[in-house]
Amino acid sequence: MYYVWKCGAFHRTNSCVARVVYRGFTLFLTFIFYTTYHLSRKPISIVKSELHRNCSIVIQPPDLNTTNNETWCDWAPFDQNNYQTLFGVLDNSFLVAYAIGMFFSGIFGERLPLRYYLSTGMLLSGFFTALFGLGFYWNIHSIWYYAFVQAMNGLVQTTGWPAVVACVGNWFGKGKRGFIMGIWNSHTSVGNILGSLIAGVYVSSAWGLSFIVPGIIIAATGVVCFFFLVERPEDVNCSPPNHHVSIEKNTSVFFGVVEFSLCLLFAKLVSYTFLYWLPLYIANVAHFDSKGAGDMSTLFDVGGIVGGILAGLVSDYTDGRATTCWVMLIVAAPMVSASSGHCMLLLCGALVNGPYALITTAVSADLGTHKSLRGNSRALSTVTAIIDGTGSIGAALGPLLAGLISPTGWNNVFYMLIIADICACLLLSRLVYKEVRSWCGYTTRQRG
């Protein structure tokens, strides 16, 4: 049952207003919803450079009585030499929980109403995000408190991606899916940008608000979701879109899911390393303050918006999802080590996030609505969760490895990212070969 706002009250409606209106409304709502998911994830990368600072260049308050001039301005327990390891603990508490939870999230997403599922997830995400920030006001200095809150937040954040992709996939057919979802998927970068800017406002004065404010925003959006999201065209008596797609005309969907999932593992390893460590890298190398480093890091996400749209547009025109990803990844490999300038940050963001965006949106929707699934549209939630869950393993590994490798030099971190890009390309080789053959007019002989 759904309601529309009319004459100061909610009224039930079963009539089908023009399907295009519902599609646009669903696209807009899910864009806002997932923007707030990423908005609430971003503050930790901005606050890192405030939790451990170079206290020798900070003016010490005259009334502060301390004998340790090197760490007086740091927030314990991040005031020790192992602070990078502790940052890695925070990152991986979230990301490992997210990766594990994602494999189960799709199963729940198939069986529960998406509107309730999303609303509950956003309310809980807001609660745990704010809980991290309250550690500032409650004067908590236990790494286990912050790690536990991060882990719980990682679990509840898995409600977002399978649900929003399933909603959009229910409303949009094959057609221009890559282009539409390329634009729509800019919510990831928009959320990162807004999260950076909001966190940057409070990071130097009261870093707890860098978490509390985004927590309030995503919780409030969860209330909007509960009242206004329409999950499927059938719910408002509209005809569903055409989902007849064929990623590979003579190859089972299973292999496509495996190859794209493993490719996404390495693509997200690169993307999330930038997401969690780029502000700290800029602060250390370019000697920016916390707010300046956070603001500059948003250029990577601005590039990601352009890259996601371009990848979707090209893949629609060429009907070559795998080849589009492969070309962008191979060009990105040498670029990641030169990502300190403004232009290079924009270019690197486009090349790194383009394939990541395409796989998690259009490719997931193509595979999840494949005709071999016998019209089971709810399977889209599970396929999306499998692909993104596998990718999230890479998202957990990237920041962890960056934390372990960065003490030996940032160049070694970039070598790791280059290797990951190359691995992602290799995993798509078979699919690229098939797409190129199809462009040349070759067809694969049916077996049996």
Image (spheres, helix red, strand yellow):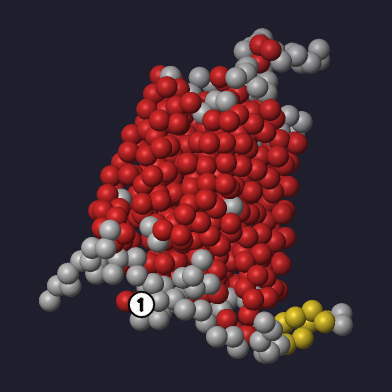
Q: Is residue 41 above or below residue 368?
A: above
Q: Residue furthest left?
A: 448
Q: Is residue 346 above or below residue 162?
A: above
Q: Position of residue 76 (x, y in %)?
A: 60, 27
Residue under the image location 56 percent in, 19 percent down = 285
> In which quarter of the view is residue 409 placed?
top left
Mark 1, other Cα within 10 Å: few <14 / some 14–19 / many ≥20: some
Q: Residue furthest front?
A: 441
Q: Is residue 248 above or below residue 14?
A: above
The quadrant of the rendering that contains the C terminus is bottom left
Q: Residue furthest right?
A: 7
Whether residue 343 is visible to the viewer of this picture, yes or no, is yes
Residue under the image location 53 percent in, 60 percent down = 179
Residue under pointer 1: 371
Q: Amino acid at mark 1?
A: Lys
Q: Is residue 259 above or below residue 20?
A: above
Q: Position of residue 407 (x, y in %)?
A: 44, 21
Q: Position of residue 240 (x, y in %)?
A: 52, 82
Describe residue 5's horizontal placement relative to residue 433 as left or right.
Answer: right
> In which quarter of the view is residue 420 placed?
top left
Q: Position of residue 345 (x, y in %)?
A: 56, 33
Residue under the image location 68 percent in, 28 percent down = 292
Residue under the image location 87 percent in, 82 percent down = 7
Closer to the camera in the image, 87 or 339: 339
Whether residue 276 is visible to the viewer of this picture, yes or no, is no
Closer to the camera in the image, 311 or 299: 311
Describe residue 290's horizontal placement relative to residue 255 as left or right.
Answer: right
Closer to the camera in the image, 387 or 315: 315
Q: Secondary structure at mark 1?
A: helix
The quadrant of the rendering that contains the N terminus is bottom right
